[in-house]
Amino acid sequence: MRQATGNSFRMIAALAAMAALALAALTTLGGCGGGKVTGGGLPTGLLVQGVVQDENGRAVSGIRIIVLPNNVSALSGSDGSFTIDVGSGTAPTTFKVDVSNRANEYYEVVGYGGRNVQGCAMNLPAPQGNIINIGVVTVYSQGTPPPPPHEICP
């Protein structure tokens, strides 16, 4: 009887330790996705998400998406996707695309919503629940000239 009680205690202690490790890993990695959510930790409010692709529909990593007026940003991942946790403060209204990390590969002209812009802040679509889905943002490779921008902003 005494041995069974000792084994039960060890089993409970081991389970508690594993649960604590799992919680610490989840918090450190920013959720199950391995850290795509910016701001550290779990999402706290409104999320802005989308995908960056080149003119041929291929995923592009390393492109910075900046949500304004919050000035919160994220880099697109290897699959081109990004998620930005803007929290629960001021509701974002626009976003910008910054290609400077990969300026030797991509033009500053960006395609979004049927138009091409350079340096402009673009309007965000309305949220669906707590998610604003930007959809696809297109960046143009240096090898092929992009279409002329409809707007050039400072």
Image (cartoon, grey):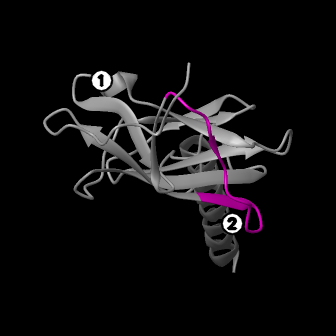
The amino acid type of the residue labelled 1 equals Ala
Percent of width and height locating residue 73? 58, 33
Q: Is residue 144 left or right of residue 82?
A: left
- Residue at x 19%, y 32% (from the top left corner): 142
Q: Nearer the viewer, mark 1 or mark 2?
A: 1
Q: Is residue 122 left or right of residue 97?
A: right
The quadrant of the image that shows the N terminus is bottom right
The quadrant of the image that shows the C terminus is top right
Percent of width and height locating residue 84? 61, 45
Q: Which residues are magenta?
A: 119-133
- Residue at x 20%, y 37% (from the top left corner): 145
Q: Quadrant of residue 79?
A: bottom left
Looking at the picture, tell me which residue is in the foreground, 148 or 70: 148
Percent of width and height locating residue 19? 63, 59
Q: Quadrant of residue 51?
A: bottom left
Q: Which residue is mark 2?
A: 9
Predominant secondary structure, magenta span: loop
Q: Which residue is mark 1?
A: 103
